[in-house]
Each structure stands twice: as structure tokens, then as C-alpha cells.
Image (cartoon, rainbow, N blue to C red):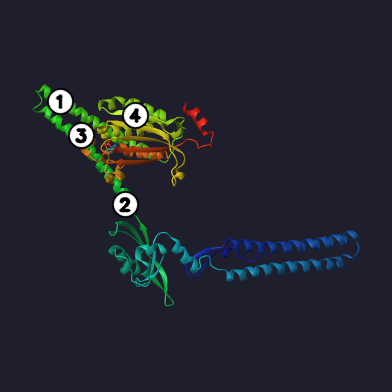
């Protein structure tokens, strides 16, 4: 009764070119055929038994005749079910023979074409058989049938191709394209069988992967470590220099000793500020993907910072002026980080805009600008000074770590060059955004936008916000 197990060996089939295709639907259809055949036996036996029992009960016929008559329909039914099952099975076999492979040549070509990395297929002599769309930007459209050396100039890649074509296993090669802009690539070269004049030959496939962004990140990291150690080394060198002087000729000069100790304290304070800022930056970066969850009244934060910086502004004869819009809704934020943002901006405005004599701090709700509506409802803090301003070429780089327009001036005023980098990361963490506008000679305005904690509710919104802020 056990039928040949057509299903099991068919679950994974070979398409004849070395690729395997699994077809679960075929397996389930075979299982169905087996079920049909199991049923026919049950039906046959059931009908036979029913007829025999009926005949015995009613005593209508003699036993041998009853059994003989019951056996006829039973046998007929069994035969019918058997043939039905065979029919299903044959249909399945025929379907299987004509079954289109899941990866037809057209699908395979379309599939490779959709891969976002350049893929190039080479024949046994290194000529390009096929290249996908992603490779056209790199190689140009005219790559077909040309030798790979005409389109890929990297000697390392060509060497790998030669090795693979002569039977070596897959190779990975990193190389750089110097012009028009430097790009770093990783080429993966692997052997692949290709059909040539009816025979299967040893071809190669090259898959290129761009490493430029990764390399740039590695470079930034290396630069950062170099910059940070340089920034720390300068005050350290100064400190050890004064230690030597105090041990040497200044040993018995109380006036010089006092002066040097003062400088040493300044240098130590500078190192502490640097380390604090570096730690601050790394902590914020670590949390940058986690948006703060508490509601913060931005105007209260700004008032607190202005109070704290009032003595510093007074010492430099800078007037702090403020303008607070009423009924500001709360923003979603981390209070301490927002304090850091406002502190850095106002501190910069006092230090670098000192010649303007005044700093204007404005807190209000952002009016959506056409085209920027997707940024949603937000409050902003604008810190405007009326000092020398910043030349246009520096603006895009101001938020880079350690970038300073005038290093000497920044150092003299106790700057680390990390303030605006910290501001940028805090603003990112708050899903906010910032803008810098400067007119050399007229001053600079730094504006930080911070999204509201709750989405705006048409006219009633102001009432709800007042409750939270008050
Ligand atoms: N309000 C401003 N006016 C002019 N230049 C500014 C102003 N704010 C920042 N800068 C420039 O941006 C640089 C980077 O600022 P920041 O990251 O806060 O570092 P730091 O203040 O420690 O030097 C400053 O060194 C300064 O050259
Ligand atoms: Mg600063």
C-alpha cells in the first residue's frame, strides 16, 4: 500500500546548472496524492464490510452470494480511487517536468542588475560578459566585451582576476580611485563557471564595494585622537616646563614662583576643561540615538543660564538682552544638556562678539518656513552678537571638533574648540536643528530649534502649554 515516495526526493531539485531550487508547493501536492491513495483503501474496505454486515443482518441472501455481491462495488470503488490517485500523481509528474526554474536566466540577470554594488562577469580570457547597472557609473556604459584591464585600472584587482581565472580561489583586494574625488573600494574576485562555445569554462565575477565613507570615518577618528592628544600635550608641556623652572633658577625667587604657580594653575584648569568637554562629548554621542523623554520649559533654562553668565558678561562690559515669547509649549529634552547648549552659545557670543557690546537672546516658537514644514513645530533660542562676525568659509566647519577660526584667541579665552561640537550633538539627540548666520563686521546669530514635547493641537494648544510652563 505504500506508494513510491515521490515527494521527498523532489523537495530540492537541481536546475542542471549547479543551482538548487526548493519548491515547497510541489512537495505539498505530492503529499495530497499520497492521501488520496490512502483514502481509496479505507473506502474499499468500508463498503465491503457494510455490504457484508447488511446481508448478514437481514438474511436476504445466502452468505456466499451476499459476500460476492458486496465485493463487486467494493472492488469497483477501490479501483476507481486507485486510478484517481494515479491520475493526480501523473499530473504532478508532468507539472514537475515543465516546472519553470525559480531562477530563470532572465530573473538571474535582473537580480544581478538590481544589486546596488557593481557586479562584473568575466569570461575565461578576462573580457566583460555582463556588468550590472551599478557598475555603469564606475565603468561607463561601453564596458561589454572589453577586456577588464580597459575599465579597471587597479593593478591589484587585475592580478586577482588573473589568479582566479587560472584556478585560484576567491580573493579580496582593496584599492583607491584617486580622481575626480578619492574613493576607496573593495573588490571581491571569485571564480564562476561561464558557458563559452557550448562548453563550461572558468570565468570570474568581480563584486565591488565602496569603502569611502568607512575610510573617512576611520580617518576622522584618527584625526580626533591626534588632535585631542595634541591639545592635552600643550598644557602638559607648559606644566612640566614650569616645574623644572621652579626647581631650578626660580627656586629662591618668591615673586617669580608666585607668577609661575598662577600660570601652572591656568594650564591645569585648561587640561581639566578639555577632559570635561571630551567626556561630555563622548557621553552625548553614546546616547545620541536615544531621544530625551522629559518635558522642559526652554525659557526657564535660558533665564537660568543668563543669570549664571551675568558676572562674566559684566566683566567684559557686554549687555545681555533677552526677549521671551509668552506661553511657550515645553520641548522634549534633557535639562542639563539644554543648559550646556545655551551656555556654550551665550559664552561664545560674549567672548567673540565682545566688541559689539551687547548680546541679544531670543526665545520663541518657530514659524514654519515653506519647504521646512516637515521639521514640525518647535521652539527656538537665537543668540545674536554684534561683534566681528565670522567669514563665510568658516561657517560649515564651526561645529567640527577643535575647529577654531583663531586658535590663539580661543585658547586665551579658555576655549577648547569643542563647545559647538557638543552643541551640535546635543541638538541632534533632541531631534532639533540649528542655523548659523553671520555678516562679517555686523555680528553672528546662532539659532537652535527644539521640537515640542507634544504635537500642536489647533486653537486650544496655547492653554495646554501655559499649564506646563507655569
Ligand atoms: N559668536 C561668535 N562669533 C565669532 N566667532 C565665533 C562665535 N562663536 C564661535 N565662534 C568661532 O567658532 C569657534 C568654535 O567655537 P567653540 O566650538 O565654542 O570653541 P571655543 O569657544 O572653545 O573656541 C571659536 O573658536 C570661534 O572661532
Ligand atoms: Mg565655545
Q: Name the residue under label 2.
A: 215
Front position among marks 1 and 2? 1
Q: In which quarter of the image is ligand 1?
A: top left
Is the distance from the Cβ of mark 1 to the nearest ligand 1 atom less than 8 Å? no
For mark 4, what is the residue?
321
Q: In this view, does 464 lie to the left or right of 419?
A: right
Q: Residue furthest front?
A: 442
Residue 457's place in the image compared with 309, above or below, is below
Please tell me which of labels 1 and 4 falls first in the chain: 1
- Give the mark nearer the N terminus: 2 vs 3: 2
Depth check, front residue: 26 or 274: 274
Distance from disc 2 to disc 3, alpha carbons, whole Å, reads 31 Å
Instruction: Give the mark, 1 or 3, whose residue is nearer the N terminus.
Output: 3
Residue beneath the point at 29% across and 63% down: 154
The number of numbered discs placed on residues in the rendered structure image is 4
Dot 2 or dot 4, earlier in sequence: 2
Q: How far apart are marks 1 and 3 (CA)?
A: 16 Å
Q: Position of residue 384 (x, y in %)?
A: 33, 35
Q: How busy is the neighbourhood of tag 3: few (under 14 within 10 Å), some, or many (20 plus)? A: some
Mark 3 / mark 4, whichever is N-terminal: 3
Residue 313 quadrant: top left
Residue 168 image position (x, y, % from top left): 34, 66
Asked which quadrant contains residue 297, the reply is top left
Taking depth in this image into account, of 299 and 167 the one nearest to the observer is 299
User: Vertical placement of 356 versus 177: above or below?
Assistant: above
Numbered badge on residue 259: 1
Q: What element carries label 1?
A: helix
Amino acid at each position: 500500500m505504500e506508494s513510491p515516495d515521490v515527494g521527498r526526493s523532489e523537495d530540492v531539485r537541481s536546475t542542471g546548472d549547479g543551482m538548487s531550487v526548493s519548491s515547497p508547493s510541489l512537495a505539498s501536492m505530492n503529499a495530497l496524492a499520497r492521501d488520496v491513495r490512502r483514502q481509496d483503501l479505507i473506502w474499499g474496505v468500508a463498503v465491503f464490510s457494510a455490504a457484508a454486515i447488511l446481508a448478514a443482518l437481514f438474511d436476504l441472501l445466502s452468505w456466499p452470494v451476499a459476500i460476492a455481491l458486496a465485493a463487486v462495488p467494493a472492488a469497483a470503488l477501490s479501483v476507481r480511487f486507485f486510478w484517481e490517485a494515479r491520475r493526480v500523481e501523473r499530473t504532478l509528474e508532468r507539472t514537475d517536468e515543465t516546472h519553470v526554474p525559480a531562477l530563470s536566466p532572465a530573473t538571474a540577470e535582473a537580480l544581478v542588475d538590481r544589486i546596488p554594488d557593481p557586479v562584473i562577469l568575466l569570461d575565461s580570457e578576462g573580457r566583460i560578459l555582463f556588468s550590472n547597472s551599478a557598475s555603469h557609473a564606475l565603468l561607463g556604459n561601453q564596458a561589454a566585451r572589453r577586456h577588464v584591464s580597459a575599465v579597471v585600472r587597479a593593478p591589484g584587482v587585475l592580478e586577482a582576476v588573473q589568479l582566479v581565472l587560472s584556478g585560484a580561489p576567491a580573493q579580496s583586494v582593496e584599492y583607491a580611485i584617486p580622481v575626480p574625488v578619492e574613493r576607496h573600494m573593495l573588490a571581491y574576485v571569485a571564480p564562476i563557471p561561464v558557458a563559452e562555445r557550448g562548453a563550461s569554462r572558468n570565468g570570474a565575477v568581480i563584486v565591488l564595494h565602496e569603502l569611502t565613507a568607512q575610510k573617512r570615518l576611520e580617518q576622522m577618528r584618527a584625526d580626533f585622537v591626534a588632535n585631542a592628544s595634541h591639545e592635552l600635550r600643550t598644557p602638559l608641556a607648559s606644566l612640566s616646563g614650569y616645574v623644572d623652572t621652579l626647581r631650578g633658577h626660580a627656586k629662591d625667587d618668591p615673586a617669580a614662583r608666585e607668577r609661575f604657580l598662577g600660570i601652572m594653575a591656568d594650564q591645569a584648569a585648561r587640561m581639566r576643561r578639555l577632559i570635561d568637554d571630551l567626556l561630555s562629548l563622548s557621553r552625548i554621542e553614546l546616547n545620541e540615538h536615544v531621544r530625551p523623554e522629559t518635558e522642559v520649559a526652554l525659557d526657564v533654562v535660558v533665564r537660568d543660564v543668563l543669570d549664571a553668565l551675568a558676572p562674566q558678561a559684566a566683566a567684559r562690559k557686554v549687555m545681555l538682552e533677552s526677549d521671551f515669547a509668552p506661553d511657550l509649549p515645553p520641548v522634549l529634552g534633557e535639562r542639563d544638556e539644554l543648559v550646556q547648549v545655551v551656555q556654550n552659545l551665550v559664552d561664545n557670543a560674549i567672548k567673540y562678539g565682545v566688541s559689539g557690546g551687547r548680546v541679544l537672546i531670543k526665545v520663541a516658537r518657530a514659524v514654519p518656513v515653506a519647504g521646512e514644514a516637515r521639521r514640525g513645530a518647535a521652539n527656538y533660542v537665537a543668540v545674536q552678537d554684534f561683534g566681528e562676525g565670522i567669514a563665510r568659509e568658516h561657517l560649515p566647519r564651526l561645529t567640527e571638533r577643535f575647529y577654531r577660526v583663531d586658535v590663539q584667541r580661543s585658547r586665551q579665552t579658555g576655549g577648547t574648540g569643542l563647545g559647538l561640537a557638543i552643541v551640535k550633538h546635543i541638538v541632534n539627540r533632541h531631534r532639533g536643528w540649528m542655523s548659523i548666520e553671520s555678516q562679517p563686521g555686523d555680528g553672528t546669530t546662532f539659532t537652535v530649534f527644539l521640537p515640542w514635547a507634544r504635537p500642536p493641537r489647533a486653537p486650544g494648544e496655547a492653554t495646554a502649554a501655559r499649564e506646563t510652563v507655569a
